[in-house]
Image (cartoon, rainbow, N blue to C red):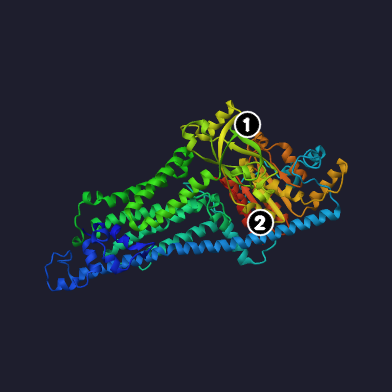
Amino acid sequence: MRIAIIYPYISSLFFFGRETMDRAQLCALPAQRLLPSFIHAVYCQDGALGMLEEGTGTGDPLEGLTPEQLEYLRQLIDAIYEGRAITASYNVFIVGIIAVFTVLHWREQERDKQKWMAIRQATSRRTITRNSRIDGSGTSTPSTSSSSTVAQTTHIKTPQDDLNLDLERLPLLPSSPPLSNHPPSHPITTKLKSWLLYQPPPLPLINRVLPSNSTTLLILAWLSLNILIQLHRLPLKWSFFFIFADRAGFLFIVNLPLLYLLSAKNQPLRRLTGYSYEALNIFHRRVGEWMCLVAVIHFASMVLYQFVLAEEWLLASQSPKAYFTHPLILLGIGAFVSYELLFFTSLGSFRQRWYEIFLGLHVVLQVAALGFLWGHFYTSRPYVVVALAIFVIDRLVWRMSVKRVAMEMDLTVLDGETFLVSGDWDILPGAKGVLAGWEPTDHVFLTVPALGRSHALQAHPFTIASAAPGKGVEGGGGGGRHAWFSLLIRAQFGNFDRGFTGQLLEYAKMHKRVEVQLDGPYGSPRALSMLRASGNAILVAGGSGIAVTFPLVWALLHEAGSQSEVDGDEDEDKQVLGLRKQKKRRGRKLHMLWVTHAHWHQRWIPKEQLDELVALGLDLVIPQPTLEAGRPDVGGIVGQWIMDSEGDTSVVVSGPDGLNRVVRNVAAGAVGQGKDVRIAVEKFGW
């Protein structure tokens, strides 16, 4: 046995990069189990070198090797061990980084909570002092949405009313002048914050959407950590190129837990960092891409060393057939092929065309890859166990048994490409999953077995578009509430079939109800907490992005209304007058911009519900549909709202990539001029 297969055997020396046994325990085991026999002799047998020097012919596998060759083998083993120890420190760094983000998130969460309580107390005091009469029950009462007077006088405004803009001639990406002439108070700090918040335009030719500079910087820092570990104290000699190949393989292994943790819907990272699975999905993809790259490096480097760089005395055979048909090498090739297929089937172009195939392959290939890896690389087994445990607990234990519910839903076709999946129920004590309620921006995974056998195993994510009743005891003691649930779904038509959403639309045209399975809810309260704590809240929706912003606005206005005092009965006119005064004196200014493509898209949210939000104080702007008037000046509208505000501003945007980038960069420009602005982009792209 020679060094042709040294790599998988030497891996047995380590457990998470640390020795599982001392040298005496190691050498007590059969040589063939752990090391090639001649490596075992060098590492374990005292006096082996002396026997060779004395010319003792004992049939020892080291017979014929020179002292220089033996010293090379010692150095090779030491370098492999050192590389494993260095690489194993990777997850220590990752835990440290997560700890830093956890502390920052908890501090921000506590600050937001204190600011929110201060706003609520101030609003309540002003309400009591001025003896306002507002019904905050959240239902359609005369003091809210059912007042025709309010609807006629405060209903949806157009941008021309406030900004005097010609929407038909303004592009979506205007070259706007500076938002303010006031210089920032701290030039270096504000310019740095502005640059971190800024999102560059897509890459030319390939049209790849780039994240914000802060996200890019964080990804580059993570990549730098990986590269540093790969190259740290690496022997710079071609004769030690095996160390480079070995370390690349181990670097793949230590990234496994992070990859699977970022892919889990029920991940602890949401509670620790405040970011939901969707927000962290970009990091999941980058980790997967990097792992596929180091897998290629590992495979190519091992082949290069075996057939080009290794000394002849190290090799039992240079036959490609003998090398590539060895069981350990075959298992490694199986793992390599499985993960590379995972990468290519996860590309956006593939997902958008064949999403159902992507879902199925993602499960099958992951299980196969972990199995191959288990057999190929002994040291990988603890990492494989952790990754598999995350996968099984998330998908089979938690999602299938705890969060999944089956129920019958209504189907309502809104237009030629959009429909609603809706239902309602009483929230009862002990309910599980979505039956126990949800929060704004939460989403669920929808399965519709009625569409066919293959669809029974498919789960597709959709944002809950209706007002949120809250979860468990936080929303009202776990019972006594009623939930109105709806999913706003736009059919996506693939190149070769109509896909899940297209088939469900066709089903909805022929059926009024359908049996579904709902897995969820999932999401993060970060956006709502941020808006609650701000004196000026701005929400921007593009098309079906209203499914994100509408529940947020509803929650903000109705929880504020619930703080009002109601002292007896008054006639309807006095209630309406009090409602209008409440709008003017409310502690938080609330704006929402909804950009639609066609007039019929505005029917996705019932007019009565929009009227109610306007009556409660929402400054709502719905420009003329882009199909008729062109793209509105989103940057101008949002920028004016930010610059007119006093104090801090929070912005939430959900829509197409172009709209998200415009709003983000307007916020970045305002930060650069001294404004206190935070922004959350709620993008649920797959």
Q: Nearer the viewer, mark 1 or mark 2?
A: 1
- Graded by Cα atoms within 10 Å as few (under 14), some (14 to 19) or many (20 or more), the crowding at tag 1 reads some
Q: Closest to the observer: 329 or 631?
A: 329
- Residue at 78%, 55% (x, y): give it: 123
Percent position of residue 649, x then y: 68, 56
Q: Position of residue 152 (x, y in %)?
A: 80, 38
Is 72 displayed left or right of 89 in the figure? left
Identify the image quadrant of residue 105: bottom right
Q: Is residue 192 left or right of residue 550?
A: left
Between 174 and 432, the one lying in front of the other is 432
Q: Is residue 59 above or below residue 637?
A: below
Q: Position of residue 458 (x, y in %)?
A: 49, 38
Earlier-in-chain disc, 1 versus 2? 2
Left-right relation of 665 to 345? right
Residue 111's disc is: none
* Contact flag, marks 1 and 2 (Cβ < 8 Å): no
Q: Amino acid at mark 1?
A: Thr
Q: Which mark is residue 178?
A: 2
Q: Is residue 92 left or right of residue 376?
A: right
Q: Which residue is mark 1?
A: 412
Q: Residue 97 in the image: x percent, y percent? A: 51, 63
Tell me what residue is drawn at x 36 percent, y 53 percent: 295
Residue 207 appears anywhere in the view: no
What is the three-letter code of the residue carrying label 2? Pro
Residue at the far top: name it. 510
Residue 412 lies in what quarter of the image? top right
Residue 467 in sight in this render:
yes
Q: Could you give the CA–CA distance between mark 1 and mark 2, rounded to whole angstroms?
A: 46 Å
Report which quarter residue 178 is drawn in: bottom right
